[in-house]
Image (cartoon, rainbow, N blue to C red):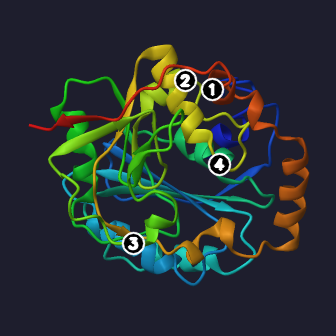
Amino acid sequence: MDYTKIANERYSAGVFINKPADGPSIEVILNKTFVDKVPFISVVIPIYNQEGIIERNLRSVLETITETPYEMILILDSCSDSSEDKVLGIFMDGGLPALLTNVVMMRSLAPLFETAADNLGFLCSRGEYILEIQADMLMVEHGFNMTLLRPFLKLNEPLIAVSGRSCHGLTYSEGVGKMGAAVEAPLNAYLDRGVLYVGETCNRGPIILRRKMVEELGYLDEINYFLDYSEHDLFTRARILKSWLCGYAPMEFISPCSDGSTRKPRDPVNQAVFAAKSAVYDRRQGFMYKWLANSPEPFPIRIIPIQ
């Protein structure tokens, strides 16, 4: 796959919803194949200035994925610290898992932010499923990928996504899982690991998505959601337009709020672009907000046993 060509022609291809016109150029800084096979899962991780934790967190992903061949697609999003060197060091050291088929590292010198970075990784993915993980997350459960895959493999439901974080409503406030600041808390012991909790939406990171469904919907909406809410818009489009569902499968991970890139001080370049985008982006123009403006009938949280 010519990642440089795909990355730098991503907007001219017209595959993204609302047809964003342009974005920063992308440089492929590592494209390394370990096993010549198509991966079952594409792990996509955007990274912005996480030099203190990125090596630990990436190694935790490598150490806990089981059973399924996977590739890693890492988006270095205008990092101004040593994150890039830390990540490169992992894949130059050797001793990598046999399930890892290949790794691709891409660098953007201008800020992309989460939605565009995810879309870039999704577009370059080859797996049947995409596993999106945020760079501040430490994976601690051996086989967490199978926890998230099991509903797809066991249930006869039109699932577009299964989150390991939470699911909740958009027309109501209730939810299940590590919602909001509860992302820092240990997993609630009373949650049933033998079921899938299905709601109006679910949360990014860690989350598995069915790649073909994401592609059919035009990926995430970069026009109206540059940093957050883009997954909720995607899942609203999925359910309303296609009758596709998303849900939550309880699993443990560690993610202190203080480690999140959006909660850390921005460097001057990032802050300038963030301010410019914040001044013109209007989430109310996205599909989700237009749908909510019509006071739709709530879709209550359902519990589906996984056999």
Q: Are marks 2 and 1 in contact (CB under 8 Å)?
A: no
Q: Position of residue 158 (x, y in %)?
A: 32, 23
Q: Amino acid at mark 4?
A: Asp
Residue 237: give its label: 2
Mark 2 or mark 3: name the one nearer the start of the chain.
Answer: 3
Secondary structure of residue under mark 2: helix
Near mark 2 (Cα within 10 A), the count class, few <14, some 14-19 or many ≥20, is some
Q: Which residue is labeled 3 in the image?
A: 185
Q: Position of residue 220 (x, y in %)?
A: 61, 35
Residues under labels 3 and 4: Cα distance?
A: 22 Å
Q: Are marks 3 and 4 in contact (CB under 8 Å)?
A: no
Residues under labels 2 and 3: Cα distance?
A: 31 Å
Q: Which residue is labeled 4 in the image?
A: 228
Q: Amino acid at mark 3?
A: Ala
Return the residue found at the far bottom. Answer: 52
Please tell me whether mark 2 or mark 3 is closer to you in this view.
3
Residues under labels 4 and 2: Cα distance?
A: 16 Å
